[in-house]
C-alpha cells in the first residue's frame, strides 16, 4: 500500500494501538524499508516503533553498526513478518496453527518476550497427533525445555498414533532417537520397529538414494539400538525384521537366540519392556439380561467424571445380535464440559462376537481427563441389530469403581436414542489408564 497524506481524521476517538496500526497499514511517515522473503516483498515500517519494542531492532537501526538502506529479511515470508509487525504496533495477535512456529521464530530472533510467551502457551494447549512432532522439533531447535517435555509427554501417552502419523517421518534423527529410547513410550514394540523402518526409507527417499539395507541402517544410526528387539515375537522377527535387512546377520541370529532362550540377551539391545501404562477396564454394567438395539441415524451418549486423573483411551460397545460377522459404521467424539471436541473417530469395522459380548473402540488420541471434570462420549453406531443394556442395567449404572478410581455417570443431552431411558444403553465400559 502506498504512503498517504490524507486529510481524513483517522486519529480522533481512536486508541493508541488503533492509530499505530493505521499508520503501519497505510504506510504513513514510514522511514524504514524491508525486503522480505524469497520474493523480496517490500514492507515499510517506523524506526521509532521498532526501536521501542526490540533491543535487536535498536541495535540494527541506531547502533554503531546500524543498517543503511533497505534491510533484507530472507528467512520468513511477508505475511508472517507483517503479522509480527502488527504485534509490535498493537500488542495483539491471533496465533494460528499454520503460523505459530514462524511467529515464534521471529519472536525469538527479535527478542519480543511477550510474543514468545503467547506462542508457547498456544503450542502447549493445542498439541495433536498431527502437529506434536513439529512442536517437538521446534522446541529442541529453540531450546524450550518445558515445551519439549510437554511434547514428549504427549508422544509417550499417544505413542501408537504419533509414530504412525506423517509428522513422525519428518523428524530429525536426533528427535527420533529421543522418542524411541523413551522407556515411557506407550506402544507395541512391533509398531516401533515398523515406524523406524518406514522413517529410514523416507530418509533414503529424501536423499534420492535406494532404500537398501545398508542405506537404511546408516540413516538410523544409534536409533536401531533402542528398538527393544528382545521384546518381539519370533514370528515378527522372521517375517518382518529379517526381510527389512536393518540388522546384521550376527545381530539377527543373536535376537533369534534370545527369542528361543530368553536368558541369553542379544548384545547391544535393551531387553527391558517399556513402562507402558496398563490398560484398565471399568464397567458401568455387565449382565446377560440384554435387549436388542435396532440402529439408526441416532446417537447414544454418556457424561462421566472420575475422582482421579485418568487417560481415557476408548470404550466398549456390544456386538451383533445375530452372532454373525457384521459390518458397522462407528462415529464417536469425546467432549469436555464446554462441549469442545477433544478427540473423535470415524471408522467402518467388521465385528463377530460370541453372544452378548462386547468389543473395544479406541480413540485416535489418548485424552488426559482431570479429576472431577465432566466429559461426554457421544457415539453413532450404525448397522445391523446389536445387544444393549436393559432398564435394570441403566438403573444400576450411575456409579462404578475400580481399585481407587471412582466414576460417576450422568445423562447427556447428546443422546437421541431411547429418550425414555435415563442413561445410555450402549457404552457399557470405559478403557483408561492411570
Image (cartoon, helix red, strand yellow):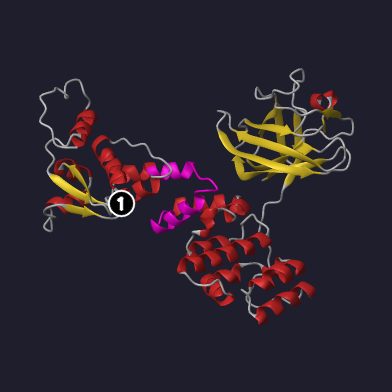
Which residue is located at x 60 percent, y 66 percent?
197
Range of magenta residues: 119-144
Horizontal side of 139 relative to 329 (left or right) equals left
Q: List the residue tagged with mark 1.
A: 76
Residue 236: name its quadrant: bottom right
Q: Split into 4 quadrants, where in the image is the N terminus?
A: top left
Question: Picture coordinates of residue 368 (x, y %)?
Answer: 60, 42
SS assignment at label 1: loop
As drawn, 269 above or below 114:
below
Horizontal side of 123 relative to 2 (left or right) equals right
Residue 217: name its quadrant: bottom right
Question: Picture coordinates of residue 382 (x, y %)?
Answer: 73, 33
Determine crowd level at label 1: few under 14, some 14-19, many 20+ residues with C-alpha closer than 10 A. some
Q: Is residue 252 magenta?
A: no
Give the total of numbered labels: 1
Seen as rendered, the residue at the extreme bottom is 250
Amino acid at each position: 500500500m502506498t504512503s498517504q497524506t490524507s486529510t481524513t481524521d483517522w486519529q480522533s476517538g481512536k486508541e493508541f494501538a488503533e492509530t499505530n496500526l493505521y499508520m503501519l497499514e497505510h504506510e504513513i511517515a514510514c522511514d524504514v524499508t524491508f525486503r522480505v522473503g524469497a520474493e523480496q516483498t517490500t514492507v515499510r515500517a517506523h524506526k521509532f516503533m521498532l526501536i521501542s519494542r526490540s533491543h535487536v531492532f535498536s541495535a540494527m537501526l541506531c547502533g554503531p553498526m546500524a543498517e543503511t538502506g533497505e534491510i533484507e529479511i530472507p528467512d520468513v515470508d511477508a505475511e508472517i513478518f507483517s503479522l509480527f509487525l502488527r504485534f509490535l504496533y498493537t500488542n495483539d495477535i491471533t496465533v494460528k496453527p499454520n503460523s505459530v512456529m514462524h511467529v515464534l521464530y521471529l519472536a525469538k530472533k527479535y527478542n519480543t518476550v511477550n510474543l514468545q510467551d503467547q506462542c508457547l502457551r498456544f503450542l502447549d494447549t493445542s498439541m495433536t497427533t498431527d502437529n506434536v512432532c513439529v512442536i517437538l522439533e521446534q522446541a529442541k531447535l529453540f531450546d524450550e525445555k518445558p515445551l519439549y517435555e510437554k511434547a514428549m509427554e504427549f508422544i509417550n501417552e499417544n505413542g501408537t498414533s504419533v509414530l504412525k502419523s506423517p509428522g513422525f517421518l519428518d523428524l530429525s534423527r536426533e528427535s527420533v532417537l529421543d522418542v524411541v529410547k523413551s522407556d515411557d513410550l506407550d506402544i507395541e514394540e512391533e509398531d516401533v520397529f515398523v515406524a523406524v523402518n518406514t522413517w529410514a526409507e523416507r530418509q533414503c527417499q529424501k536423499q534420492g538414494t535406494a532404500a537398501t539395507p545398508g542405506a537404511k541402517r546408516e540413516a538410523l544410526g544409534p536409533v536401531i539400538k533402542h528398538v527393544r528387539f528382545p521384546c518381539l515375537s519370533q514370528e515378527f522377527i522372521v517375517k518382518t525384521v529379517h526381510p527389512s535387512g536393518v540388522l546384521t546377520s550376527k545381530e539377527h541370529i543373536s535376537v533369534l537366540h534370545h527369542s528361543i532362550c530368553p536368558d541369553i540377551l542379544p548384545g547391544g539391545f535393551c531387553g527391558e519392556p517399556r513402562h507402558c501404562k496398563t490398560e484398565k477396564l471399568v464397567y458401568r454394567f455387565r449382565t446377560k439380561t440384554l435387549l436388542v438395539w435396532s440402529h439408526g441415524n441416532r446417537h447414544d451418549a454418556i457424561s462421566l467424571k472420575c475422582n482421579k486423573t485418568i487417560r481415557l483411551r476408548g470404550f466398549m460397545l456390544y456386538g451383533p445380535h445375530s452372532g454373525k460377522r457384521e459390518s458397522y459404521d462407528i462415529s464417536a467424539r469425546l467432549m469436555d464440559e464446554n462441549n469442545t471436541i477433544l478427540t473423535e473417530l470415524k471408522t467402518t469395522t467388521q465385528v463377530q462376537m460370541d453372544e452378548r459380548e462386547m468389543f473395544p473402540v479406541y480413540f485416535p488420541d489418548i485424552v488426559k481427563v482431570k479429576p472431577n471434570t465432566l466429559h461426554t462420549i457421544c457415539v453413532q453406531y450404525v448397522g445391523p441389530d446389536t445387544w444393549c443394556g436393559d432398564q435394570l442395567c441403566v438403573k444400576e449404572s450411575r456409579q462404578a469403581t475400580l481399585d481407587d478410581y471412582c466414576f460417576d455417570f450422568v445423562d447427556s443431552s447428546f443422546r437421541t436414542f431411547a429418550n425414555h431411558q435415563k442413561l445410555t444403553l450402549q457404552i457399557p465400559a470405559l478403557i483408561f489408564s492411570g
